[in-house]
Image: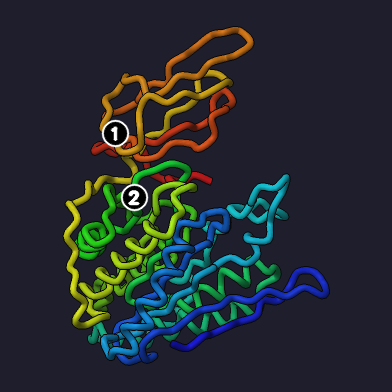
Amino acid sequence: MICLSTQLRSDSPSTTRALVAYRFGAEGAGPKAYLQAGLHADEMPGVLVLQHLMPLLQAAEAAGQMMGEVLVVPLANPIGLSQWAFQRPMGRQETTSLHNFNRGFPELADLVADKVEPLLGPSAAANVAVIRAAFREALAQLRAAALTEMLEMQAALLQWSCDADYVLDLHCDHEAVMHLYASPARPEDTAKLCRAVGAELALIQDISGGNAFDEAHTVPWLVLQRRFGDRFPIPAAAFSTTLEYRGQFDVDDATAAQDARNLMTFLASVGFLRDWPEAPDHADARHLPLGGSSEVFAPQGGVVTWVAKPGQVVVAGEVLAHVTDAASRVRLPVLAATDGVMFRRELWRSCLRGQGLAHIAGENVLHDGELLSD
């Protein structure tokens, strides 16, 4: 195991922060996997999972079981972790700009397309190497020119991950079942990951808008395929996903330890470990379009009491919850807008009129464009 650290330039005098990563296996000796947690710095389940994963990786390395390189960033957002207000963590959005830490990552294809065009040729493997080298160069320049600590942090994280074959970004929701977001480019890897980690739902979209960290790795290959694919072979060289480790309060050592073993199982199944005793054996997840997800809203402000639980299959018109206006004593139902799986709901038991309360994943595409919430 090797510890890596890179310092971020601070926006204010006399303060410094650093990003820390741990490398297991030999750099360049095989496929590369990159795992991070805490990009939304108020989400702790994934952070704890990686704390349990690293000793397993260290033991595998010592036993000679590693067949590739695994880079782990156990806390991807030191900026957000320091942001608290009224004794509550505020690590989802940067407080100065209100920019979501997991939105607006650099568009790598736009940065490198013109530069790589004359260097591409008939070999897919050579083209991948050319493109990844261009990614690294562009990100170094982008990081040097970054005007804020947050933008530099985004570029620094991508510097570590842009040449990875597998990228896993660990998050959680408010209250939710285990689910993930993935591109349709590599469905076998998506299915294998779901069976390894026990995800109940995979939400699939090629471009969902906002350029979150996971899509900052998959979308560039798609864009370059569309631009050059009729002349040069360009594969979907990165499998990247956002893994939602249930809800905010699902933080305990026993669960995290099992989740870490499940990640080891996935890594073994895609060629990073030999002689791992377990194989992906969870039930197949539902794979549904992200554009088929619908949000349900509060009909009035008040107290929320839930009828439906995360993971429950519901039908359009079914009562999911009630909202009670304590002043008027009016109690109104919250109804499902579509058939599907209610996979997440809000943590807070108070609400304002028109506030989003839950999401239902359905089979039929209802919308496209900007599909991610703030």
Q: Is residue 122 left or right of residue 137?
A: left
User: Which scheme is used to colour this image of the protein?
Assistant: rainbow
Residue 339: which quarter of the image? top left
Query: Residue, x 66% and y 73% (percent of image)?
Result: 146
In three-dimensional space, the C-alpha distance between marks 1 and 2, rounded to whole angstroms, equals 13 Å
* Residue 310 higher or lower than 234, as above or below: above
Q: Earlier in the sequence, mark 1 or mark 2?
A: 2
Q: Is residue 117 something one can see in this rendering?
A: no
Q: Could you tell me residue 263's position as x and y percent?
A: 31, 67
* Residue 27 higher or lower than 337, as above or below: below
Q: Could you tell me residue 128's position as x and y percent?
A: 32, 82
Q: Which residue is mark 2?
A: 178
Residue 130: which quarter of the image? bottom left
Query: Residue, x 40% and y 39% (percent of image)?
Result: 344
Q: Which residue is mark 1?
A: 312
Q: Is residue 312 left or right of residue 44?
A: left
Q: Secondary structure at mark 2?
A: loop
Q: Secondary structure at mark 1?
A: strand
Query: Residue, x 35% and y 28% (percent of image)?
Result: 308
Query: Residue, x 19% and y 56% (percent of image)?
Result: 282
Q: Could you tell me residue 370's position as x and y percent?
A: 45, 46
Q: Could you tell me residue 278's position as x and y percent?
A: 19, 69
